Each structure stands twice: as structure tokens, then as C-alpha cells.
């Protein structure tokens, strides 16, 4: 078995816990691969190095991401293109999509025994049409259309399969997957959706309305969203999973649909989604 390790060394103790993962996997007979850029901090660990992540992703059996939710989400999207599963080791704050905490690394032996589950998660395909070109992005959590630095409200138009859904006046709109329903959308008043479902969740951010509510759309839906403003100097931005941000021109269309590829998250613990949500939200309250 070969594992591709993706650490986020900006996280406290990530280097230490990545070392623990590498040593434990080596004891279990697993070959660990790390990108060449981490050669210096990992040169004394039982790992081999690769120059390009695509090389490791094509050859590995699984990916192990050591970091917070952002790191795990990024790794899951990279791995999805190669059909590889991802195990997240949480060294961040919440760890909604993590499979293990740092004090649970003894469970890594379950990988060798084949005692694990693969949790397939729906992803979004986000298409921006700009000046006759198409740019395609993928999201495991969400795509957000929102205003820039100026505190000015935006006008949004939403179409479903070319039919009008409605107009919104708001600071922004979130299109989330079920996985993303516990992220930004939750803070905007959206519902928690079981990740076993395949659907799109539209949640307005600070809507200027008494009656605007989040809306759930079926998995075959194609949402077209256009953001605009009648005032000069008011910009809108498309942000994908909080990692990619693109400035939009007035009323440039953004299309969101369920992606054909899925993210595969490895589970080594017998916990259900609602136990995880309750545990993590309890941590947030404390």
C-alpha cells in the first residue's frame, strides 16, 4: 500500500503529527510519499519524495491530509480527479471532514485490515462564463457570490434550468453541498443537510427582506446566478471553498450544478454524521 501525505505545516503541531503518521504507517508496511518541497522538514522521516503531486496521486492507494478542514477539503478535491480516497487527520479547530484526531492514530492499522468505510460526498461544479470563455472550478463545501470591501448591497438574479427562481437583495449568496451545509451556510441561517443526500442549497447572506429563506434544489438542478449593482465601484466576487477568489464583472453568469466526480472520505470510526455535528458544534459553543 502507498499513501500520499499532504500536510499543512502552517498548523501548530502539524509537522509533529505528520511524523507520527509516517512512522506508524512505516511500521505497518505502508510506503509514504511526500512532495519534494517538504524535503527539509521530512528528510529524517521514513518517506520518499516526489516532484509533482499528480505523480503521487496517480500511483498512491490513498491520500492522508494532516491539517484543518481547509487542508482536507483541498486534498479531497485533488484526489477526486484521480478517484482516490482521503483520510483527514485533524490538527485544526473543528475538523468536520476529518477521519481521525491526533490521539487516534492507533486506528491506522484498520487501513491495512480493510476495516474502513468510504464516505462519498457530492461536489459542486462551478462554471464562470467570461468574455466568451468558460472557467470551471470544483467545490466540496460551497461557492459564494458576495460583495467586496464596500458595504453596499448587491442585486442577485437566480435561474433554475433557465427558469426564473427569484431576485435577491443581499450581501451575497451561498450555493452549498450537503457537506458545506455545516460551514458558511450554517452561519447564514441555512439548514444542516445529511451528506448522504445529493442536492444544492442556496442560502442568502444578510438578505434585505423579511421573508427570504434558504432553498434546497434537486441534484439535477443547474443554478444560474448573476450579481449586479446599479452603483459604480461596487464589485462582486466568486469564492470557491474559501480558497479561490475571482472578481466578477457586472451580471457575469455563474452556473452551479452537482459534479460528476465525488470526494471519497475514509472513515475509521463508527460514528454517524449527527454525532460529529453535535460534537463539533458543542466545541464551538465552549
Image: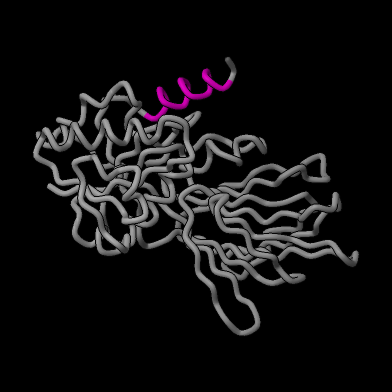
Query: In the image, is residue 280 part of the stretch drawn in magenta?
Result: yes
Q: Residue at x 48, y 24 (%)?
A: 280
**Colour setting:** one colour
Q: In front here: 211 or 259?
A: 259
Q: Position of residue 126 (x, y in %)?
A: 53, 63
Q: Residue at x 57, y 36 (%)?
A: 191
Question: How many numbered marks appear?
Answer: 0
* Residue at the right extreme, as displayed: 231
Q: In front here: 135 or 108?
A: 108
Q: Quadrant of residue 212?
A: top right
Q: Is residue 76 left or right of residue 193?
A: left
Q: In front here: 193 or 147?
A: 147
Q: Is residue 208 left or right of residue 276?
A: right
* Residue at the top extreme, as displayed: 286
Looking at the picture, does residue 38 appear above or below residue 101? below
Query: In the image, is residue 165 part of the stretch drawn in magenta?
Result: no
Q: Quadrant of residue 237?
A: bottom right
Q: Position of residue 158 (x, y in %)?
A: 68, 61
Q: Is residue 29 left or right of residue 261?
A: left
Magenta stretch secondary structure, dominant: helix
Highlighted magenta segment, given as a residue range = 273-284
Q: Position of residue 254 (x, y in %)?
A: 62, 67
Amino acid at each position: 500500500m502507498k499513501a500520499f501525505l499532504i500536510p499543512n505545516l502552517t498548523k501548530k503541531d502539524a509537522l509533529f503529527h505528520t511524523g507520527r503518521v509516517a512512522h506508524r504507517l512505516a511500521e505497518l508496511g505502508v510506503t509514504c510519499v511526500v512532495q519534494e518541497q517538504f524535503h527539509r522538514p521530512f528528510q529524517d522521516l521514513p518517506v520518499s519524495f516526489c516532484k509533482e503531486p499528480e505523480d503521487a496521486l496517480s500511483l498512491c492507494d490513498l491520500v492522508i491530509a494532516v491539517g484543518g478542514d481547509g487542508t482536507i477539503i483541498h486534498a479531497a478535491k485533488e484526489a477526486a480527479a484521480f478517484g482516490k480516497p482521503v483520510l483527514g487527520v485533524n490538527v485544526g479547530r473543528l475538523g468536520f471532514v476529518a477521519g481521525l484526531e491526533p490521539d487516534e492514530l492507533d486506528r491506522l492499522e484498520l487501513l491495512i485490515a480493510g476495516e474502513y468505510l468510504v464516505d462519498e460526498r457530492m461536489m459542486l461544479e462551478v462554471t464562470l462564463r467570461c468574455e466568451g470563455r468558460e472557467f470551471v472550478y470544483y467545490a466540496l463545501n460551497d461557492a459564494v457570490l458576495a460583495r467586496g470591501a464596500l458595504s453596499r448591497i448587491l442585486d442577485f438574479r437566480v435561474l433554475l434550468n433557465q427558469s426564473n427562481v427569484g431576485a435577491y437583495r443581499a450581501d451575497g449568496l451561498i450555493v452549498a453541498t450537503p457537506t458545506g451545509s455545516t460551514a458558511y451556510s450554517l452561519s447564514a441561517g441555512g439548514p444542516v443537510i445529511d451528506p448522504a443526500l445529493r442536492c444544492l442549497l442556496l442560502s442568502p447572506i444578510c438578505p434585505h427582506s423579511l421573508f427570504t429563506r434558504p432553498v434546497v434544489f434537486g441534484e439535477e438542478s443547474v443554478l444560474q446566478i448573476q450579481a449586479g449593482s446599479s452603483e459604480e465601484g461596487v464589485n462582486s466576487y466568486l469564492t470557491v471553498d474559501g480558497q479561490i477568489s475571482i472578481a466578477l464583472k457586472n451580471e457575469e453568469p455563474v452556473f452551479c450544478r452537482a459534479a460528476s466526480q465525488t470526494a471519497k472520505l475514509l472513515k475509521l470510526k463508527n460514528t454517524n454524521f449527527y454525532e460529529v455535528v453535535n460534537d463539533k458544534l458543542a466545541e464551538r459553543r465552549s
